[in-house]
Amino acid sequence: MKNIYLVGFMGTGKTTVGKLLSQNLNKRFVETDELIEKREGEQIVDIFAHYGEPYFRKVEKEVLKEVANQSDLVVSCGGGIVIDEENVRLLKTTGVMICLTADVECIYERTKKYTHRPLLNVDDPIKRIKELLLKREPFYKKADYFVDTSPLSCEEVVKKIVEILKDAQIIPNSS
């Protein structure tokens, strides 16, 4: 089976939902950011600080290529993975791309207590969230399916994704 790629902005629930979804579908879960940290031996925030975003995006692309060579995975992708056209092509050809969305206030509430989000370590994180969402919107729109996680529990998001996958005949209706 093709991979199920969860894309979307930070704080939309990709990791939490991905873990639950993988359990529900009995598939292996991987997270690109976690694979990057293992490979580099540093946390994302430190990679950004020491080497900058271009270096991080290069490593992210390499990790995605490795993941895309596997199948039957549920993959939580880093929020900015979609800003690279080659990454989007790879996501779409090796799996189904499901974009998790949330409103700005919800994203802020979900991310405000974490300092490991290098792109939000700024004076006005709400303004930064709005800027990044606007910049990434055309890329996120390339996803195959969309689920707004703002009003839903993680379990409800998983249920909705499973329904989408069944309707699209990506997974059998008996799952």
Image (cartoon, rainbow, N blue to C red):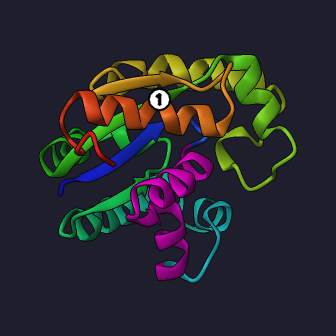
Q: Give the residue furthest to the right.
A: 113
- Farthest residue, direction front: 174
Count up the numbered dots: 1
Q: Main secondary structure of the magenta part?
A: helix
Horizontally, residue 9 falls left or right of residue 108, namely left
User: Residue 21 colored magenta?
Assistant: yes
User: Picture quarter containing residue 12?
Assistant: top right
- Measuring 30% from the left and 38% from the top, which residue is drawn there? 97
Residue found at x 61% / y 63%: 44
In this rendered view, identify the residue nearer to me: 73 or 34.
Answer: 73
> x, y percentage for residue 166?
28, 35
Q: Say which of 79 and 27 sits in front.
A: 27
Disc 1 marks a residue whose amino acid type is Lys
Is residue 96 positioned above or below 58 on the image? Answer: above
The reply to whether residue 12 is in sight is: no
Asked whether residue 139 is drawn in magenta, I would say no
Task: Decide if residue 149 is on the left or right side of residue 85.
Answer: right
Q: Percent x, y for residue 108?
A: 77, 28
Split into 4 quadrants, where in the image is the N terminus? bottom left
Answer with the quarter of the image where residue 132 lies.
Answer: top right
Judged left or right of residue 103, residue 98 is: left
Q: Position of residue 35 (x, y in %)?
A: 47, 72
Span of residues in magenta: 14-39
**Identity of the residue drawn at 47% across and 24% down:** 147
**Which residue is most to the left?**
93
Label 1 neighbour load within 10 Å: few <14, some 14-19, many 20+: some
Judging from the image, what secondary structure is the residue with disc 1 in? helix
Question: Compared to 109, does 137 lie above or below?
Answer: above
Q: Is residue 109 visible?
A: yes
The residue under label 1 is 160
